[in-house]
Amino acid sequence: MIIDSLDAPLPGSSLLPTPGGDVYTDPETFRLEQQNIFETMWNCVLRVDSLASAGQWKRVTVGREELIVVRTRKAGIQAYYNVCRHRGMRVCTTDEGKSRTLKCGYHAWTYALEGELVAAPNLTSMPDVDRQEYGLKPVHVREWLGYVWVCLADEPPSFEETVLGEVRTRFGEVQSIDNYGIENLKLGESKTYEVEANWKLIIENFMECYHCATIHPELTEVIPEFADGLASQRKNGEIHGASFGSDIEGFTVDGSSGVAELPAIAPGQERKYYAITVKPQMFINTVPDHVIIHRMFPQSESKTIVVCDWLFLPEVVEQDMDISKSVELFHRVNQQDFEACELTQPSMSSKAYTRGGALVPSEHHIEEFHQWWHETMGYRQQPAATDSPVKASADAVIAEQ
């Protein structure tokens, strides 16, 4: 670890500004993020194989909306707003289940798994009721990488241009994500973390490694180059495959060998770690023998649920091979990262952070995330570093909406 001792501050040209603290604490800003980001973009919500048979369903929350995701008999996996079309009660009131139909517990309006209204008290005496029109309101659904993706927008953005385009551009041709066969992997472990921090702090943390030497001793032991502060993610979308240490056998908590290597990874990928951010709420981490997927679900301006999945070859899971050392490494990384974010969140409300902080050169690629946030939120100009750095722009957006 190299820490430079300076007699004077770094020249201003070496640093880039961050947004002010209000961006991470203001409830109205969070509401606009839900509206303009999470409710308009594609969100990765759950694993396809968690809905293995017809009738299985789960509740998920995207933005401010609660959805039912269900495997139908005729149409594959579908998703609907969890709102009865009669008087608006939640149709599904538990987190998951399996049933032949979806039935509201208030007035017994009943929907087929494919969404149409199929039964209700006295429905036969109302032949003019259009059962499709009064069916559950659907949302757009895609399957990719073995996960279900949903979009609440009436006209969703192109999945190919946004999600697939971002991933393929960032992985490049040689380090193609397709080599990992993620859609064919099986879930070896899943952990859910309740993080008392704004979702943007979590993304910013994941994108940089300036902190790695300080808080990630296990990770920097396995990948020594991370101790120099440069992350896998770089400016202009460049992805750098971070190499294992010369005496490291696998991506495990003690550097010992992992489990069965993924068979189709390209030459040069067999001893490297890659990581990318798929905005707005997914991280993909790949190593030679497994893949780690993070999904974020912002709950408020200061709380985020993060679900982390560890994926392995089917035979690893089916034969109950020992994956504990593989899981433990990134579980510790998660705990260390999330603690850092939680210790940062309170300072976002401090007078000392009103004007924001700074990005050092190895973090300059985070500026691209900040610019994306600014543009996606629809601000007409970059929020100024005043006593309230986002208020003027936020108020302008609210006035237009």
Image: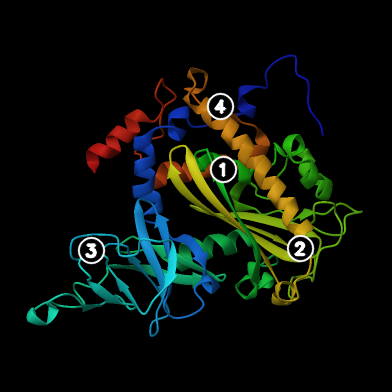
Secondary structure at badge 2 equals loop
- Kindly indicate the quadrant of the structure image that contains residue 341: top right
* Residue depth check, mark 3 versus mark 4: number of the one nearer the observer: 3
- Left or right: residue 49 compared with residue 178: left
Q: Is residue 208 left or right of residue 155?
A: right
Are there few (<14), some (14-19), or many (20+) residues within 10 Å of tag 4?
some
Circle 1: residue type: Ile
Which circle marks residue 323 in the picture?
2
Which residue extends farthest bottom?
74
Disc 1 to disc 3, C-alpha distance: 40 Å
Badge number at residue 229:
none
- Dot placed on the residue nearer the N-terminal end, 3 or 4: 3
Mark 1, residue position: 202
Give the quadrant of the C terminus: top left
Amino acid identity at mark 3: Tyr
**Horizontal and vertical percent for residue 9?**
67, 18
Mark toward the start of the polypeptide (4 vs 1):
1
Q: Nearer the viewer, residue 126 or 390?
A: 126
User: Measured from the top left, where is residue 380 in percent x and y?
Assistant: 34, 38
Q: CA distance from mark 3 to mark 4?
A: 51 Å
Q: Where 77 sits versus 204, above or below?
A: below
